[in-house]
Amino acid sequence: MKFVFKTQVRVRYVEVDQSGFVYNGNYATYYEVGRTEALRQMGHTYKEMEDSGIVMPLINQYSRFYKPAIYDDLLTIVTTIPEVPKVKIRFEYEVFNEKGEKLNEGSNELAFLNKERQRTQRAPEWFVNLFVEYAKKQG
Amino acid sequence: MKFVFKTQVRVRYVEVDQSGFVYNGNYATYYEVGRTEALRQMGHTYKEMEDSGIVMPLINQYSRFYKPAIYDDLLTIVTTIPEVPKVKIRFEYEVFNEKGEKLNEGSNELAFLNKERQRTQRAPEWFVNLFVEYAKKQG
Amino acid sequence: MKFVFKTQVRVRYVEVDQSGFVYNGNYATYYEVGRTEALRQMGHTYKEMEDSGIVMPLINQYSRFYKPAIYDDLLTIVTTIPEVPKVKIRFEYEVFNEKGEKLNEGSNELAFLNKERQRTQRAPEWFVNLFVEYAKKQG
Amino acid sequence: MKFVFKTQVRVRYVEVDQSGFVYNGNYATYYEVGRTEALRQMGHTYKEMEDSGIVMPLINQYSRFYKPAIYDDLLTIVTTIPEVPKVKIRFEYEVFNEKGEKLNEGSNELAFLNKERQRTQRAPEWFVNLFVEYAKKQG
């Protein structure tokens, strides 16, 4: 089962460079908003994850740019978690403008780092259960 | 006695917005670089300050914009500490381009926050001494 | 007559530095969102302003920091335009967290720059009228 | 023939998030600095490219994170252009800290966009010649 979530961001002036297009590095931020709001929609916050002593550093990130996003665009970020996380979690992203044009797609994988021990670990059990519960609710 | 330091930054593409000018919020970063390199030139790093358990949050910041900085400009940041810090430290900044035009000036004041106790305190003694020593060396 | 507007932003992970507090330079972005949404609530967009050939560079900016904003805070930005713009426009900002604590306040003044002529000018007539019309509607 | 360039950046406070590590999106900026300085070392600036009417939007970007960069690290960015550009240009990046540890590697491909016509084109002839000349000088 796939877990699919949607959220929106308005392109800020600061995010657009002198080419008139959103600076490429800002897609990392849009992806961050995408996965943060995905977790919130599952009834959880990434803040709670960190409060429990686990940070989630990136392992890798891929991005493909189709069309530019421009200032004041209201973007829709579709975030997909293709499977229940184990030792890492994978997120896939698609970014659309208001015309429904796909501007960008990307993916990344994040680890679970025990902040105190500075060691990676498996996804916490309560986090895995969140997916199981969410899947049940979706039927 | 005034403490005056110089450092340079090259304007990055990401820092310029679609007006073709450096986005105003990035001057906060240039000021950060200015005061970081000022401390380094005094034989100290801000990293050491934080490692000793003290962070330095901003109390206020003022900025005045004269002319725009543009992409790839090599900026000179002149950072002045007008007096030895006590309960807070004041920094003053002037930003020039390669033609010597003054583009921006600003100032801010920072407190000394004991991270563990989450309380502000006076400037640490070793930090105050740094100024005294530096003043001696300058004659 | 004062013109007062409200909007909200969620603090992003990218906006928080290692002190655990929002990096000071990001308030410039929150102010940007505040004034952008203020104009939108008046029935206009800053994008339309730029499309008409006028950019609005900052003349000055002041910021005062009371308490830190932290990750995932839902901030309310109250943006006030204290008077109808003439040769420049003044914005005042207050930033509150969900507990209603005032975290920050600031102000800035922006000019009207004719992009093609690279000269400042008075506020365009249609823009001034926007305020007059808005004031009428508010009674 | 491969074209290899080195440059250094100091990690800024603004670039580090509350995990204590450089925020992932800032590697896009480090890559930008890497390729900008690569071009400068070849006797050219990206600014001249844009002044000639050509912007270079990203087509894709890949990044792999090995170890975190931390505040005040002096990073070395090794930028490799694996072949003379034709319809696009490929850059490869490796980021090292002062201990010589590889923290990150990545790559991206950029197109050549004629700004006025809003159409992509082949690499300009003078730009291709730059590589030919540079290769000669290197022997």
Image (cartoon, coloured by chain):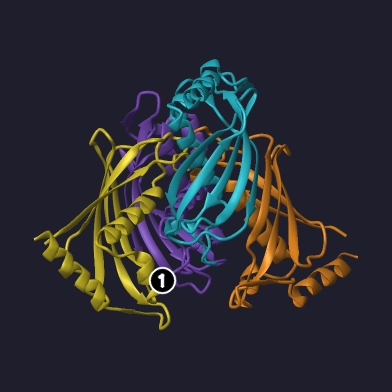
Chain colours: A cyan, B purple, C yellow, D orange
Q: Nearer the viewer, residue C83 or C132?
A: C132
Q: Nearer the viewer, residue B82 or D73?
A: D73
Q: Quadrant of the N terminus of chain A?
A: top right
Of the residues shown, which amino acid type is indicated by label 1? Lys
How many other residues sit within 10 Å of disc 1, few (<14), some (14-19) or many (≥20)?
some
| Residue at horizontal 76 percent and vertical 67 percent from the top | D87
Query: Residue at the left extreme?
Result: C139
Tell me, yes or no, if residue D12 can be seen here: no
Image position of A64 (left or right of C134): right
Position of residue B6 relative to residue A44, above or below, is below
Image position of C114 (left or right of A32): left
Query: Residue at the front extreme?
Result: A139
Provide residue D1's location: percent of width, then percent of height.
88, 60
| Residue at horizontal 44 percent and vertical 47 percent from the top | A8
Provide residue A28's location: percent of width, then percent of height.
55, 46
| Residue at horizontal 48 percent and vertical 59 percent from the top | A99
Position of residue B53 relative to residue D99, above or below, is above
Query: Residue at the bottom extreme?
Result: C117
Provide residue B113's location: percent of width, then percent of height.
36, 33
Q: Secondary structure at mark 1?
A: loop
Query: Residue at the right extreme?
Result: D139
Q: Which residue is mark 1?
A: B67
Image position of D26 (left or right of B22): right
| Residue at horizontal 30 percent and vertical 60 percent from the top | C40
Provide residue A50's location: percent of width, then percent of height.
48, 26
Q: Nearer the viewer, residue D43 or A114?
A: A114
Tell me, yes or no, if residue A1 can be seen here: yes
Position of residue C10 relative to residue D53, above or below, is above
Q: Nearer the viewer, residue D10 or A59?
A: A59
The chain to which mark 1 is attached is B
